[in-house]
Amino acid sequence: MTDLKVLKGIGEKNAILYSRIGIDTVEDCVFYYPRDYIRYEQISDSDALECEKVNAFEAVVVKRPLVRYVRKLSITSVILSAGGNAVSATWFNMPYLAKSLKVGSKYVFRGILTSEGDQFHVRQPAIYEREKYEQLLGRINPVYPLTKGLTNAAITKTMRNAFDYLDDRVEHEVYDMHFPVDESTLRAARSKLVYDEFLSFIIRIRLIKEKQHAAHNSFNIIETAQCERMIEKLPYRLTNAQIRVWRSIQEDLCSNRSMRRLVQGDVGSGKTILAVLAAVTCALNHHQCAIMAPTEILAGQHYDSIIRLLNANSIDVKVCLLTGSMSASAKRNVRSMIEDGSADIIIGTHALFQESVIYHDLALVITDEQHRFGALQRSKLSSKNANDNAHILVMSATPIPRTLALILYGDLDISLLDEVPAHKKPVKNAVVNESYRNSAYNFMKKEIAGHHQIYVICPLIEASEGMEAHNVIDTAKELAAYFDENTRIGILHGQLKSAEKQRVMDEFSQGAIDILVSTTVVEVGVNVPNATVMMIEDADRFGLAALHQLRGRIGRGSAQSYCIFMSSSDNPETMKRLNILKSSNDGFVIAEEDLKMRGPGDIFGFRQSGDLHFKLADIYTDAEILKKAAAEADRILKDDPELVKPENEHIRKLLLLTQDSSFVGTTL
C-alpha cells in the first residue's frame, strides 16, 4: 500500500481530511467510488422551462437581492427574468450572494423549478458563467461522498492523480466507474465490478458453511421452566410465528450441533423477546451469552429492556453493558466480570469481539440487525470460547425476498416471523409531492400540539455539489423558520460523534426534542413510542424496502402514527412504486414488489441495500447479477473446492482484495 501523501497536493492537513472518509492510501482512492453522477443539461429555451425537474436556464438579475434573517437562518432572495419569465430564486445561508449578484447581470442557473401562481420559483440553484457551464456539457461527472473541508472538485482531482500514479495496475472497469466516457461504458464497468463483488462474497459464505457443518459443542443446554413462566407472564400473547420460531431456537440450543440461525422478521414482529428468551436459557444453564447491537443507542435500549424483564420475573441473571464510549475504568471492570464468569449476559457493540475481551464460557452469540455485521465478525465472536463453537442467532428486520435471502445468508438456517402482533396499530401512509408541503407542516404542528414528536428524514447530511436532494442541515433551518420559536428541533446524522448522537437520541426519547431531522441513521436503534409522524424527503430516491425500514421507527406506541412520503418527482412510474407503501405495511410483500419493479441498471439513486456493506452492489437493482454470481460460485466450488486450480487464480485475487471487508468471513 502506498501512502496518500505521495500524490501532488496532499500534505498532512489534507491527509487527515481524506482519512475521515476512509482514504489513507493511493490504492484506497480508486475504490472510493462516486455516490452519484451528474449530467449537465443543455441550457433550456425560455419557453421550454419544466416544473418539478432540474432545469438549466439563462436569466438576468432584475432586482437587487434581499437578505432577511429568521433566528440564525439567513434567506437570500432575488427576482430573475428568463426570457420574460419571472423566476423567484431563494438561497439559505448564502448572504454573500447579495453582493455578487449584480442587477442587469446574466448567469446560468441550475435547479428544480416549481410554479407559484404566474411565476416560477427555484430553491438553492447553482450559479455559473455561461462559458464555464458549457464546458461541463457532454460529460458524466462523478459526485463523491464529502466531508467538511473537502470539495467534490478536490476529490476528483485526487482521483485522477491516483490513477496516474498507479498507471496500469488498476482494472479499466475501476477507472470507468470514476470517469466514464458515456453511460454505456459506466453500466458495463459497474456490472463487471458488481459481479466480482457478489462472486467473492458468495464464495466466502459457501466456504464458511462448509466449515460450520462440522461444528459441534458440548454445552448440554436444557429447557428451563423459568423461560416458560416468563412467556406466560408477558403482557401479550406470542404469535403463532413467534412460538414456532422459538421452538426451533430451543431445539438448536439443546442439540450438540452449533446453531447458525437467522430470524428474519418485519418491524414489530417480536424478534427481541425471542433473543431474550434464548439469552436467559443460556444463562440459566450457567453459560454466557453475548448480544451484539449495531449502535450504542440500540445496545443501551436492549440492556434496559432486558433488566426490566428479568426484574419483573425475579430471575437472578447478571447483565452487563460494554460499548466503545465507556470510560477506560468501566470497560476494565466489565471485561473482568466477563473473564471471571460473573457476567452472564453481555450486551454491546463491536467492542464485544475485541482481543481484550476474554469470555469465561461463551455459548451463545446474538447479533441484532444482522445485515450490519459481516460473516467474519460473527465468526470472530463465536470463536471466543476456547473449547467449543458458540451458537449463533442473528436477527434482521430487513425485508429481503426469500430467493435472495437464501443466497446472501447461505451460511445460516432461516426462520421467518411472518405475523405482526394483533395489538399493533398499522401506520397510515400518504404519498405526496411538493404541493402538499404546507399541509404536511400544518399537520405536524397539530401533532406537536398534541404532545407528539416528529421525524423528518433527509438523504444527505449537508448540501452536496451536484446532488439535487434535501439535506439535514438546511432542512432543519427551514423548519426552524416555519415553526414557532417554541418548537424544539434537533439534528442527527452519521458524522456526529457517538456521544453527541447518544445525547440527541436521549433528548428525543425523553421528549426534549419535538422534530428530529435525521439521515437514515435512525433506521435502526431508535425506539420512541411518542413519535407519531415521519416525513421522508425525496422518497423517490430510496428503495421501497429501505423506506419501509424507516417507517418502522413510528407506530411503536398506542397512538395512531402517520408516514408522509414526500416525492420530488411526479413521474407516474415513480408514484406507482411509492403507492405500494401506501397500500401495504407488510415488509416482505413490499420487498417482493420492489424486486419486480426496480429493474436492472437503476444505478443512479440512493442505494437500497448499502447496509450489507457492498461497495457497489445492490441486491435489488442487481438481483439478476446476484443469481448469476451464485450459480457461478456453486460451479467453481463443485469443480475446485480448495480453489487451487490455475484457472481460479482470479478468484483467489478477488478474495484477497476483500478479506478485510466487514462482510467476508474466512482467510485463505
Image (tube, rainbow, N blue to C red):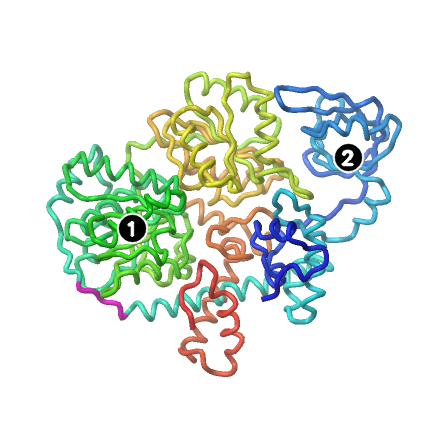
Instruction: Say which mark, if any, is on residue 138.
Output: none
- Left of 115 or right of it: where is 433? left
Considering only vertical position in the picture, is 640 above or below 497?
below
Q: Nearer the viewer, residue 387 or 51?
A: 387
Label 2: state its secondary structure: loop
Name the residue at the front extreme: 329
Marks 1 and 2, how far apart at CA: 64 Å
- At 65% from the left and 59% from the top, the residue drawn is 5
Neighbor class of circle 1 (other Cα within 10 Å; few <14, some 14-19, many 20+) is many
Find residue 15 and report its horizontal and vertical position in percent.
63, 53
| Precedes in sequence: disc 1 or disc 2 | 2
Q: Give residue 390's quadrant in the image.
A: bottom left
- Left of 171 or right of it: where is 458? left
Quadrant that contains the N terminus: bottom right
Quadrant that contains the C terminus: bottom left
Name the residue at the left extreme: 225
The three-letter amino acid code for the residue at tag 2 is: Leu
Instruction: Say which mark, if any, is on residue 49.
Output: 2
- At 52% from the left and 55% from the top, the residue drawn is 618
- Left of 419 or right of it: where is 566? right
Asked if residue 529 lies in the magenta stretch, the reply is no
Give the residues drawn in magenta, as a range.
Answer: 214-218
Total marks in image: 2
Q: Is residue 420 visible?
A: yes
Find residue 154 and report its horizontal and vertical position in percent.
70, 50
Find residue 536 and report its horizontal and vertical position in percent.
52, 34
Residue matched to label 1: 335
The secondary structure that most of the magenta stretch takes on is loop
The three-letter amino acid code for the residue at tag 1 is: Arg
Q: Nearer the viewer, residue 322 or 271?
A: 322
Q: Is residue 430 visible?
A: no
